[in-house]
Amino acid sequence: MQDLGTLGGRNSFAVAINALGQVAGNSQTDPEAPFSYAFLWSPGEGMQLLANDYIQTHATAISDAGDVAGIGDGGYYYGSTYALRWAPTGPVTLQQTCGLDVYPCGNEATDINSGGLVTGSVATATGQRATRWSADGQIQYLPTLGGASSRAVAINWLGQVAGESQTTGGAVHAALWR
């Protein structure tokens, strides 16, 4: 067992590991601060804070290429969340959807594959909608099973996405997008 440490705070939490032994997670940066931030830990570099412009960030997944997916949070006062991707070369801006018809934004990145494709969901006027982002950050809405809402939670190296979707009748079913 190995202690990965913290970013200076009291607590840290690992959420994902890749084939290279890199770990993504979240850590406090100050023992007194209530917020935590996404980190990438690697055997040679140790724990590194992932760049952000948010009150707090949360890592949710890591690819075998070292890309990290996650969420930027505006915090208690703002209430919005934003899907994020950190590549080994730096942050990649993911196209967000949050207009005047939807506030607060409720966007999330839940998984990432080795090609840099990110999956997650975004808030719409009718509910959450499953999405896939290309490696350059462009958003693609995934179809539903006839209902208003859906959520993507995992993506494989082929770009196939697993999640759930509401049916026309209002039930929620497991779904696979190819």
Image (cartoon, rainbow, N blue to C red):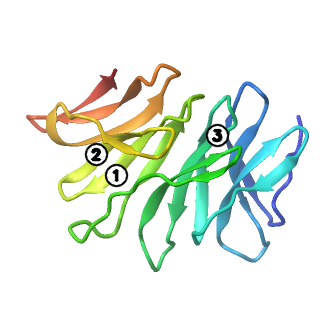
Question: Mark 1 near mark 2, Cβ–Cβ under 8 Å?
Answer: yes
Q: Describe the element under mark 3 as helix, strand or loop.
A: loop
Q: Percent position (x, y) of residue 77?
A: 46, 80
Q: Quadrant of the C terminus?
A: top left
Kind of residue sitting beneath label 2 = Arg
* Residue 174 placement, left or right of 57: left
Q: Which residue is mark 2?
A: 129
Mark 3 to mark 2 CA distance (whole Å): 23 Å
Mark 3 Cα-neighbour bin, 10 Å: few <14, some 14–19, many ≥20: many
Residue displayed at 65% across by 69% down: 35
Q: Which mark is residue 67?
A: 3
Mark 2 Cα within 10 Å, few/some/many (few <14, many 20+)? many
Whether residue 167 sits left or right of residue 120 in the image: it is left
The number of callouts visible is 3
In-image side of 167 versus 139 (left or right):
left
Q: Give the distance between the C-alpha atoms of the residues marked 1 and 3, in whole angstroms.
A: 20 Å
Quadrant where the image shows the N terminus? top right
Residue 84 in the image, given as x and y percentages of width and height: 53, 53
Residue drawn at 49 percent across, 35 percent down: 117
Q: Are marks 3 and 2 in contact (CB under 8 Å)?
A: no
Residue 12: which quarter of the image?
bottom right
In the picture of the structure, the residue carrying the numbered disc 1 is 122
Mark 3 or 2: in front is 3
Label 1 vs label 2: CA separation?
5 Å
> What numbered label is drawn on residue 133?
none
In this view, the residue in front, 84 or 74, is: 84
Q: x, y percentage for residue 14?
A: 71, 44
Amino acid of disc 3: Asp
Q: Position of residue 162 (x, y in %)?
A: 39, 27
